[in-house]
Amino acid sequence: QHPLDNTYASKFLDRYLEVLDNLHMHFLQSDVEEFDGYRKTLDELTERQGDIKPSLRIFSRFLERIEQRVDYVDELLKTEKFEFAGDDRYNLDRRKTARPKDLEEARQIWRQHLRYEILQEKLAKEKPADIADKITRRYARLLKTLKEYDNEDILELYLSALAHAYDPHSDYMGKSALESFNISMKLALFGIGALLRSEDDYCKIVSLVPEGPAEKSKSLKPNDRIIAVAQGSGDPVDVVGMKLNKVVEMIRGEKGTKVTLTTIPADAPDPSVRRTVNLIRDEIKLEDQEAKAKIIDLPPENGKSLR
């Protein structure tokens, strides 16, 4: 019931900064001070001009800080040997802590958090030789994921922050999120009936839905990798390195329409082998995700039955 004015523009900015960096580990105080001018302009830019450039500018700075952190962690893992013989303390929950005043202070925080991550792996009995490799891959995966964000993904974060300024339980759903929400409500979708995941830049088949087009084709199986997708009689589009949700959008479609997948079969004797599979999309029922109810009558006890 409140208009989007300077008061709510300020809340909007704070929520967006928190969405990106809720542990106050990446944005410097100078970054926040630089963005403070938006507290008096976000209402005008958003509501009356439809201008979302602030979201892109702030996200770009966030990505820059993430890149700096990943580079610094890589350097530490290669050059420093971490010891845990002293009496040390690290605050994991920095949500109420001031943001680092400069890059040097941010690096101190990143170094402490890295020590914590290494200690966690040591306590989990990971081999010392494997710890650095595991953490390096974890940070590389984080950076790759954030670099794959497109304008639609950023807009979803940005407008959800605006919604949270009014109500913490309201979100803005982009096209992909809305489609996934509707599927979860209807427990049905139109596609080929395959559960997919991203692995080493490839879209890999995890499992097939019984009686779905993919299973009925007898040409697809778990661990096959999808490298291209074509619509109808169109040309194949290379999907290696593409975000998983984008590949999924390309494979889903209207019932009765054709989609063609180019795959590297899991059992291929040579990774250069390619297989082309033509499928007709159909409705896939997600019955295993249905909520279920059951009434249980227990045997009488003391003359009374219990339902």
Image (cartoon, grey):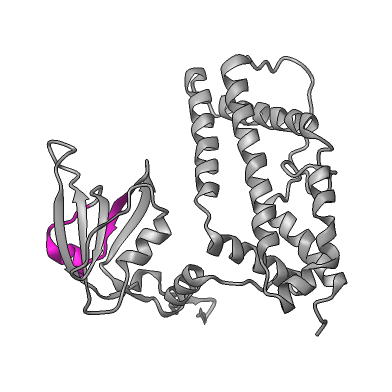
Instruction: Specify whether residue 121 is painted magenta.
Output: no
Left or right: 98 as drawn, with respect to 204: right
Q: Nearer the viewer, residue 302 or 287?
A: 287
Q: Nearer the viewer, residue 42 or 117?
A: 42
Residue plotted at (70% across, 27% down):
111
Q: Nearer the viewer, residue 134 or 65?
A: 65
Left or right: 293 as drawn, with respect to 163: left
Q: Position of residue 284 (x, y in %)?
A: 29, 74
Q: Would you identify the image quadrant in which residue 14 lies?
A: bottom right
Q: Position of residue 279 (x, y in %)?
A: 18, 67
Instruction: Specify whether residue 218 is painted magenta.
Output: yes
Quadrant assignment for the N terminus: bottom right
- Residue span colored magenta: 203-221
* Image vertical order of residue 103 relative to residue 129, above or below: below
In the rendered image, is residue 212 in sight? no
Q: Nearer the viewer, residue 243 or 133?
A: 243
Residue plotted at (31% across, 74% down):
253
Q: Position of residue 225 (x, y in %)?
A: 26, 48
